[in-house]
Image (tube, rainbow, N blue to C red):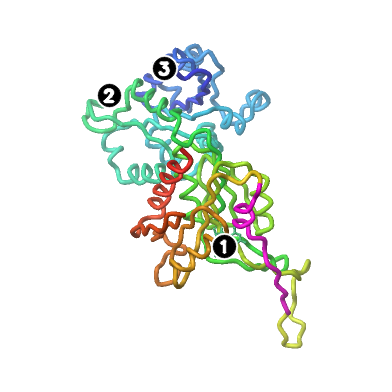
Amino acid sequence: MLDGKRILLIIGGGIAAYKALDLIRRLRDRGASVTPVLTRAAEEFVTPLTVGALAGQKVYRALFDLTDEAEMGHIQLSRSADLVVVVPATADLMAKMAGGHADDLASTLLMATDKPVLIAPAMNVRMWLHPATQRNLALLQADGIRVVGPDDGAMACGEFGPGRMAEPMDILAAIDHAFAPGPLSGKHILVTSGPTHEPIDPVRYIANRSSGAQGTAIAAALVALGAGVTFITGPASVPPPAGVHLVRVETAAEMLAAVEAALPADAAIFAAAVADWRVANASDTKLKKDGSGRAPALDFAQNPDILATVSAMAEGRPRLVVGFAAETNDVLANATAKRARKGCDWIVANDVRPATGIMGGAENEVTLITEEGSEHWPRLSKDAVAERLAARIVEALA
Ligand code: C5P
C-alpha cells in the first residue's frame, strides 16, 4: 500500500500520456495522493480537466502563474512530495533533465526537487536508441534518477522495438520499490567528505587535493540502502549526492561543529580530508607585499581531530565510527596504528602516492582494518568501494 504517500506526477507530452490517467487512479486506490503537473505538450494528449478530476487535485501547468505562486511556490511544490514520477518521460524531457534546463514548470520542478525521481521513458524506437538519448539516460542514472522501462513492443507510431512506456502496473511496482524500506531505513548516518579550506586571509587558503568523490559515493550508497544521511562536506570538486541532508562547511572547526550538531547517529563515516593545521594568525585583510622581499610569517595551530573527538565520546558515540587513512608509505602499519590512536572501529586505508592516481581519481584500492584484522580489497571504482563498505555497515548495524 502507498497510504499517505505524496506523489508529484509530471505528465510529459507523448501518446503514452493516456496511461498516466490509469496510473493516477491506481495510485489513489492504493492510498497515495497525486499532485499532477502537465507540460504544455502533455495538454495535446490529455486534458487538464480529466487529469484534475482523476487526481482530485489542482493541476499545475505554468511556471509563471501568479495564483499558483501565491498559493504554493514552485520550489515548495517540488519538495512537498515524497516521490516525483515522470510519466511519460519524453526524449525532450529527458534531455532537459540531463542538461539541467529549467524553462517550464516541469523542468524547473525537476531541477528544484530534493526528492527521489522516477521516470518512465516513452518514445519512438529510433529516438530511444539515438546516442543522444542513451547518453542522457546514462547521465540521469548517474545522477541517481530511477528508471522504469521502456518495454519492447508495438508502438503507436507503427514501429516495433524498445521505447514503449512501461505499463501502469510496472510503474506502480517501481513506485512501491522506491518506498520499500532498505536495510538501513530508520538509521541515521553521518558522512564527512571533501577537503577543508583554512583561510590565510580573505582571499587565500590552505587546502588539499581531496575531490570528495569517495565520501560522496559512500553517502549515495547509504542513501540507496535507505539510510537517512547527513552529509557534511568541505568545498569538494564533485557535486553532492542526491537525497542527503546537506551541510556545507569550509574549515575543520566548522566541520566539527556541524558533526556535533548532527549527532546522534547510528554510524559516522569520516571520509573528509581535514586539514591538520589552520593559520592561527589569519589576516582579516588581504596580505600585501611590503617591499622588503620578506614573506609573511604564518603561525599554525592544530585543528581539532573530529574523528578522534567523536570516537572518544563517553555519551552519544555512534555505534560504528569509521575513519580513513590516506597514506603514502607503510600503509598497513600506519593505518593500523591510526585505528588504535584515533579510537575508531574501522579504518579504510588507501595509498595516495601520486603514482596510484587515487587522490582525485575515479578508482580506489583500500584495506579495511577492523578489530579482527585487515582485509585488502582489489582496485575498484569509488562507487564499488562505497557499495562494499555500505554492505559492511548494514552487517555492523544489524
Ligand atoms: O590523522 P589523519 O588525518 O591521517 O586521519 C585521517 C582520518 O581522520 C580521516 O578519517 C579524517 O576524516 C579524520 N580526521 C578528522 N579530523 C582531523 C583530521 C583527520 O576527523 N582534524
Q: Quadrant of residue 30?
A: top left
Q: Is residue 167 left or right of residue 324?
A: left
Classed neighbour count for the residue bearing mark 3: other residues with Cα under 10 Å, few (<14), some (14–19), many (≥20) = many
* Residue at left offset 44%, top offset 44%: 221
Q: Three-letter amino acid code at disc 3?
A: Leu
Horizontal and vertical percent position of residue 225: 44, 38
Residue 21's tag is 3
Q: Residue lying farthest bottom?
A: 292
Q: Name the one closer to the observer, 269 or 295.
A: 269
Q: Which residues are magenta?
A: 297-314
Question: Is residue 308 placed above or below 74 in the rendered structure?
Answer: below
Which residue occupies the foreground of this view, 216 or 69?
Answer: 216
Look at label 1 and name its amino acid: Arg
Q: CA distance from mark 1 to mark 2?
A: 66 Å
- In the depicted structure, whether residue 267 falls above or below residue 75: below
Q: Is residue 85 magenta?
A: no
Identify residue for label 1: 341
Residue at disc 1, secondary structure: helix
Magenta stretch: includes residue 301: yes
Seen at 67% across and 61% down, the residue is: 304
Element class at badge 3: helix
- Badge 2 crowding class, 10 Å Cα cut-off, few under 14, some 14 to 19, many 20 or more, is few
Q: Position of residue 223 (x, y in %)?
A: 48, 40
